[in-house]
């Protein structure tokens, strides 16, 4: 589970269907189901995380898997052990699903290849965010959140067809935006990308035109359109939902915005701006949020318009579905 570029519409629908079933499990009483009893999930996070890591671990526990979390600080990585040897150590202890986050693009894919080359191809690798490349579980939970908003009775890919979704902000540093582009266009939604040229290069308009190397033919016959906007008001015209992105200053090697205040004036989502889109248009954000920069503080706290907490909650059933389907595929 490395990238969404290889997902067909049927793949998304299967994932949504399983996630919706897990979401419907009673929230009181014993919360565990025995689906992954005897399986062993290890989270290997080489980059900070609050939501993704906890959410994967909660998901694995709800499925009755054994869970172990690895952190680089204090590990033998400090003594020079390689990432592959670290992973193989957990495999030797019984891990059969590895959830991997890394600051460099391509690490989960390389690890999956290396594991296969060392005879451990049965070990599942789940990408929990790699560099600028991909963050599939986040895009899938965004998809569940949007589909449930548009069609609470039947949150399938059909709920997204013909919708217009704006993605605003630091697109160039965002693996979430890249994964969202694959998932949203696969469902037939049109995507309005918006940001200044420093954070949104022109080439993004072609992002989903052809699948990345190794995928061959695009499994989706007709994708939604991608359009680029520099002016927020034009980007927001006629949209059904707005996804905002964090300014990822830890990835900026030079100053790409003038000040957070000026960025907020040009690209920040305020209540007035969202109201102009329509009374039921929601705003999403993968978190963590720079409060008052990408999103105004009052909007962030308004659960009727801002779906950030719904996204976090949906992360658990979506990751349960991913772990469940991946474990089933490995059997
Ligand atoms: C995102 C990430 O790490 O890519 N956050 C997340 O997983 N919820 C986005 C971000 O860090 O801005």
Image (spheres, rainbow, N blue to C red):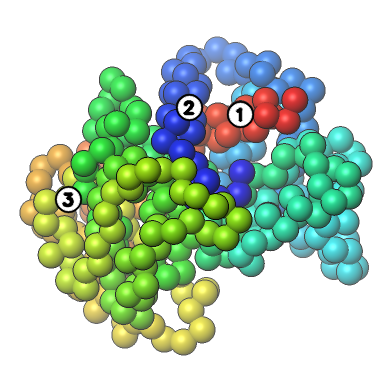
Q: Residue at x 24, y 62 (%)?
A: 227
Mark 3–mark 2 distance (CA, rounded to whole Å): 27 Å
- Left or right of residue 33: residue 73: right
Pointer 2: residues within 10 angstroms few (<14), some, or many (20+)?
some
Residue receiving disc 3: 239
Q: Earlier in the sequence, mark 1 or mark 2?
A: 2
Q: Within the image, what quadrant is residue 326 found in?
A: top right
Determine contact: label 1, label 2, CB under 8 Å: yes
Disc 1 residue crowd, few under 14, some 14–19, many 20+, Cα 10 Å: some
Q: CA distance from mark 3 to mark 1?
A: 33 Å
Is residue 20 visible in the rendered image? The answer is: yes
Q: Which residue is mark 2?
A: 14
Q: Quadrant of the N terminus?
A: top right
Query: Which mark lies nearer to you, 3 or 2?
Result: 2
State which quadrant residue 97 falls in.
top right
Q: Earlier in the sequence, mark 3 or mark 2?
A: 2
For ligand 1, tell me if the residue under mark 2 lies within 8 Å: no
Decide which of 26, 11 is in the foreground and name it: 11
**Residue 135 pos. (x, y %):** 52, 52
Residue 325 in picture, x, y percent from top left: 61, 29
Q: CA distance from mark 1 to mark 2?
A: 9 Å
Determine whether the residue tagged by mark 2 lies in a helix, strand or loop. Answer: helix
Tally of numbered discs:
3
Viewer-nearest residue: 116 or 45? 116
Q: Give the residue pinned by disc 1.
A: 325
Q: Residue at x 44, y 59 (%)?
A: 210
Q: Residue 44 location in percent, x, y?
A: 72, 51
Give x and y (percent) for residue 145.
Answer: 35, 37
Q: Which quadrant would the C terminus be assigned to in this image?
A: top right
Identity of the residue drawn at 44% across and 23% down: 17
């Amino acid at each position: 589970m490395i990238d969404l570029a290889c997902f067909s519409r049927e793949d998304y629908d299967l994932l949504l269907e399983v996630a919706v079933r897990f979401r419907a499990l009673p929230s009181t009483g014993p919360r565990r189901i025995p689906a992954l009893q005897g399986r062993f999930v290890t989270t290997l996070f080489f980059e900070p995380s609050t939501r993704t890591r906890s959410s994967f671990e909660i998901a694995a526990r709800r499925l009755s898997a054994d869970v172990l979390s690895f952190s680089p600080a204090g590990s033998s990585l400090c003594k020079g052990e390689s990432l592959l040897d670290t992973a193989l150590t957990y495999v030797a202890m019984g891990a059969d699903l590895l959830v991997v986050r890394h600051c460099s693009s391509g690490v989960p894919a390389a690890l999956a290849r290396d594991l296969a080359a060392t005879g451990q191809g049965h070990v599942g690798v789940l990408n929990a965010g790699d560099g600028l490349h991909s963050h599939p579980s986040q895009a899938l939970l965004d998809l569940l959140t949007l589909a449930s908003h548009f069609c609470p009775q039947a949150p399938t890919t059909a709920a997204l067809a013909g919708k217009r979704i704006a993605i605003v902000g630091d697109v160039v540093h965002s693996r979430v935006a890249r994964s969202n582009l694959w998932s949203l266009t696969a469902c037939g939604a049109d995507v309005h990308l918006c940001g200044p040229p420093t954070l949104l290069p022109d080439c993004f308009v072609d992002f989903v035109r052809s699948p990345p190397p190794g995928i061959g033919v695009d499994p989706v016959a007709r994708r939604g359109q991608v359009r680029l906007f520099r002016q927020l008001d034009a980007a927001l015209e006629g949209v059904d939902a707005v996804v905002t992105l964090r300014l990822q200053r830890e990835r900026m090697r030079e100053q790409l915005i003038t000040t957070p205040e000026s960025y907020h004036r040009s690209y920040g989502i305020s209540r007035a701006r969202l109201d102009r889109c329509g009374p039921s248009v929601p705003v999403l954000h993968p978190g963590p949020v720079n409060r008052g920069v990408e999103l105004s503080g009052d909007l962030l706290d308004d659960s009727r318009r801002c779906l950030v907490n719904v996204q976090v909650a949906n992360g658990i059933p979506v990751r349960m579905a991913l772990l469940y389907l991946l474990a089933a595929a490995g059997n």
